Every structure is written in C-alpha cells, then in structure tokens.
C-alpha cells in the first residue's frame, strides 16, 4: 500500500473521531450516559487502530520523526482493557444496557448462575404448591 493511500486512510479515521476530550471528561467524572460511554469506547478503539497503522507506516517508510515515534511507541496497548470488559456494543446500544460476554467477568457469571438456580428452585416450589392446593390452569 502506498504512503499516500495509508495517510489518506489515517485522515479518514481521524475525521471520524468525535470530541474525545469531552468523552474522557464525562467518563472520568462518571457523568456519561450509556451512549456517551459506548461512543468513548468506539473512539478509543479507533485511536488504537490509528496508532497501529501509524506504527506500520513509520516502520515501512523508515520515517525519522523522533517525537511522533516516541508518542506511538509509548501509546498504551488497550486490547487487554477491551478484552477484560468484553461486551457486544451493538446489543448494548439496542438494549440500553451492558451485558458482559460469558467468561469475561467471573463474578457476573457466578451471580447469573445463582439467579438462574434460585429461579429454578422457586419455579419448582410454585409447581409443588399449586399441586398441593389443587390449583391448575
């Protein structure tokens, strides 16, 4: 891929970024609603992609830009953060709530399992009581 094409791709991604400073402030202050939080996560993913692409371009072109190189090399890898709290962003937008994917948060998985177990026990208890009272419908 040519340098011009790569740079145009990076420019297009940068144009797609929203007001990231405002989102950071809202998320940090815990005043972000779900839509703002999801947009923030999307923007952080775009920024990580931009940094990765810029790193590839700099390596391929052997660019001598010490400040840019330092910024790119010191940018934190956000993949572990995205993986740690993994959830489907499309479903979260549609449902208006975040539901972690299975096996990403053990505490949440245990709580859901416990709720399901209690629900099953209550359903069985209700069936038994209906039978004892002769209540069928």
Image (cartoon, rainbow, N blue to C red):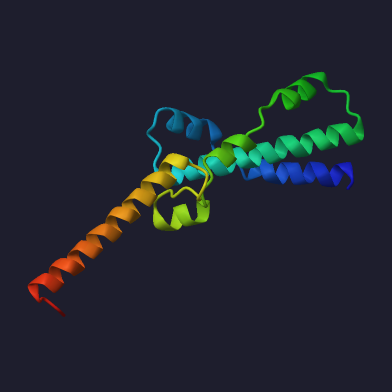
Q: Position of residue 122 (x, y in %)?
A: 23, 59
Q: Quadrant of the C terminus?
A: bottom left
- Which of 118 and 8 lies nearest the eye of the viewer? 118
- Residue farthest left in this picture: 133
Residue 106 location (% of width, % of height): 47, 41
Is residue 27 shown left or right of residue 117?
right
Residue at the image point whose x is 70% and y is 41% from the top? 49
Is residue 18 visible to us here? no
Count the marks: how many? 0
Q: Position of residue 95 (x, y in %)?
A: 40, 57
Q: Dividing the picture into quarters, in which one does residue 131 lie? A: bottom left
Of residues 113 and 72, the one nearer the viewer is 113
Q: Is residue 119 left or right of residue 17?
A: left
Relative to 20, is 88 above or below?
below
> Is 110 on the left-hand or right-hand side of 19?
left
Identify the residue shown where x is 89% and y is 45%.
2
**Residue 76 in view, yes or no:** yes
Horizontal and vertical percent position of residue 26 = 43, 32
> Residue at 80% of width from left, 33% of height from top?
55
Q: Residue at x 74, y 42 (%)?
A: 10
Relative to 62, is 44 above or below? below
**Drawn side of residue 16 relative to residue 115, left or right:** right
Quadrant of residue 130 within the rendered picture: bottom left
Q: Give the answer, above or below, for where 72 lies relative to 125.
A: above
């Amino acid at each position: 891929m040519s340098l011009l094409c790569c740079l145009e791709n990076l420019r297009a991604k940068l144009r797609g970024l929203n007001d990231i400073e405002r989102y950071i402030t809202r998320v940090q202050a815990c005043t972000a609603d779900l839509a703002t939080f999801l947009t923030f996560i999307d923007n952080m993913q775009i920024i990580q992609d931009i940094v990765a692409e810029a790193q590839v371009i700099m390596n391929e072109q052997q660019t001598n830009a010490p400040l840019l190189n330092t910024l790119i090399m010191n940018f934190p890898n956000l993949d572990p953060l995205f993986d740690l709290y993994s959830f489907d962003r499309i479903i979260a937008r549609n449902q208006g709530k975040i539901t972690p994917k299975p096996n990403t948060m053990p505490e949440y998985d245990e709580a859901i399992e416990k709720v399901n177990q209690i629900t099953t026990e209550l359903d069985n208890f209700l069936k038994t009581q209906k039978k004892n009272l002769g209540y069928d419908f």
